[in-house]
Amino acid sequence: MKKKLTRLLHPGMGVYFVVMLCFCMAALLLNHLVLAALEAGVTLLLFISYMVHRKLRHRSLQRYIEEAPNTVETKGAGESPFPTVIARLSDGSIIWNNHKFVEMTGFSDALIEQSLADVLPGFSTDWVIDRKTESPYDVTVGGRRYRVYGTTLKADDHIGTPLGIFYFSDLTTLYQIRDEYLRSRPVVSIILIDNYEELTKNLSESAISTMNAKLNTAITEWTESYHGLFRKLERSRFLFVFEKKDLNRAIEDKFSLLETIHQITSPSGLPASISIGLGIDAANFEENYNFAALAIEMALSRGGDQAVIKDRFNFTFYGGRNKEAGYTSKVRSRVTANSLLELIGQSSHVFVMGHKNADLDAVGAAMGMVCLCRKKGKKAKIILDLEHNASKRLLDEILQVPEYKDVFISGQDALLQCDNRSTLVVVDTNRPDQVEYKPLLEAISRICVVDHHRRAADYINPVVVNLHETYASSASELVTELLQYGVEKDDVLPIEAKALLAGICLDTKFFNVRTGDRTFEAAAALQRLGADTTEVKLLLQNDFQDTMAKYQIIKSSRLYRQEIAIAALNTAAPRILAAQAADELLNISGITASFVLYPENDVVFISARSIGKANVQMILEPLGGGGNAATAGAQIPDSNVKDVLDRLVASIDKFYEN
């Protein structure tokens, strides 16, 4: 409104000539012929004088632009190679322009002053006033894109009116070439059939050929629509290279091959599952392929049945909603046990570390690793905060055992003891920010990881030995398998077997969730080693006050989407009780997922559980959490419960909408 008022107060000479002609017409209508002739003569003389003055001013401006040191006028030719315009910075009024600007905009050099905003809607001169020489945005005129450059001038008058001179560089062709270059960048993808061995197990050669034909046909039909290069590398591994312009279509299609492939089943009824790893935005094909290999490894470590895109900075995940398939082969555990024993034998010190606020699974897995080291004649140390943990009852028993008298140390002490031949074994987590003492992780180069959670984008890397199996119920189950291949029965202490069984029972809710053949095999092996389920049950008991507090948490919960229970607490709560409350909520009919939020200092914690289609790991991942489809958690710093609750609900909605 202010700019419009300014233009009304400075309407240009055209309005005055119109007014003077009106006076002439009025005199004629009143038969004042002499007065009308006199007014017409004066108007004509003034108009001629104005036009001459305007032409002289135009030439003066042209010379001024040519002589000014910060303009780009072509010497001698008197014409800028770009569309150029000069305007008053106070109101944006155009006071001069060249013919290329007229060709670009269709601007008519009328007697009435016009604003740049009228000729180029939305154009702003603020950036020039702020002493910038390039516009932060491009201008589109007639379907062509222009980059705008500008500078300030001072008018040669007694006021020194600030002027802005603007040059428009046509970059349409350059943008078209750039866009085509970006659209045609290669995307290298690896397609892997996750459960090929299980699909073809115990099948005849003809049945295997039929299965291969079905799988190849489904994958080929999906790739054909993207007009790329498709080749089979191995029985279950394919290479697919296509252009980036088709990647968005695949994303919008939600990588439909992930669901299509499920329609192919083995004679026993097992559906096929694939993973897709895509590498983009690399410097060359080799790096793109390496990105794709990292992406497929990430997909497999998260349970498969998903597509993962890896660029220079991040991983992006699609799919992965189905539960991980269980595998009966223990080959990897046996190979890992041999590699780990060899590495332990070559180490000067061995340190074992779980996640912060270590639970029974982390402590049990750590004790299993201590047993493995003891077999090789190495006394391992466990990094654990004896004050802040979720395993106090078990630790009270462990500290009474002579073999564990000096096993538990602080992270600072371990940092002082480690050297370049030290080995660090991380159990029950794969994220650097969640380990008990991160400086130790950064100080030791030889790192091993034993974990069952879905791999996060910021996983620990690099590692020397990696046993990362998302199908496993717990880290204690994986360590139990390592012990079966690395030690004898007499090498395992009863307290160690008890701790490992406690870890399995904790994560499986006493074998109610995430259990498979190998879970029960591990539990049976631990019972043979001296573990007692009754004693484990006693470890997981709550006292009366804790039980009442747990049910207060349950009482505060609210129902969302008719099947999700959310308890948002405004006061701190013991982490064990929050996790137990989340478990207990799943015992209510109709509840398939539960979330318990509670604050602690400046951090909001979330415990999540699921027994339905809701993948709590995928829901909490955007909030920085991790875990697996049935059990997950998150820690959100510098926030409050209300804000975190809003983010959680938005993430739940997004999960169900996709």
Image (cartoon, rainbow, N blue to C red):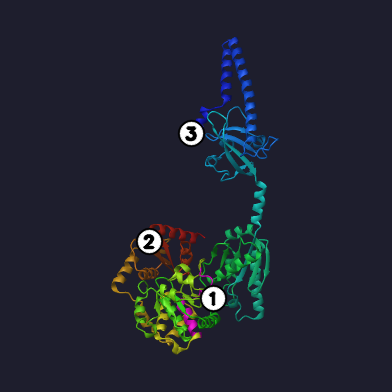
Q: Amino acid at mark 3?
A: Lys
In front of the other: 207 or 465: 465
Count of numbered badges drawn on the protein:
3
Q: Is residue 323 magenta?
A: no
Whole-percent x, y for residue 653 in the image: 47, 59
Residue 24 lies, with reference to residue 272, above or below; the image says: above
Q: Secondary structure at mark 2?
A: loop
Q: Secondary structure at mark 3?
A: helix
Per the model, the C-alpha gap separating discs 1 and 2 is 36 Å
Report whether 552 appears left or right of 475: left
Q: Is residue 480 magenta?
A: yes
In front of the other: 170 or 318: 170
Q: Amino acid at mark 2?
A: Asp
Whole-percent x, y for residue 608 in the image: 42, 67
* Residue 512 visible, this angle: no
CB under 8 Å between callouts 3 and 2? no
Nearer the N terminus, badge 1 or badge 2?
1
Kindly report which numbered mark, 1 or 2, lies closer to the viewer in this rendering: 1
Q: Residue furthest left?
A: 545
Q: Which residue is mark 2?
A: 602
Disc assigned to residue 464: 1
Q: Amino acid at mark 1?
A: Val
**Magenta span of residues:** 459-485
Q: Which residue is mark 3?
A: 2
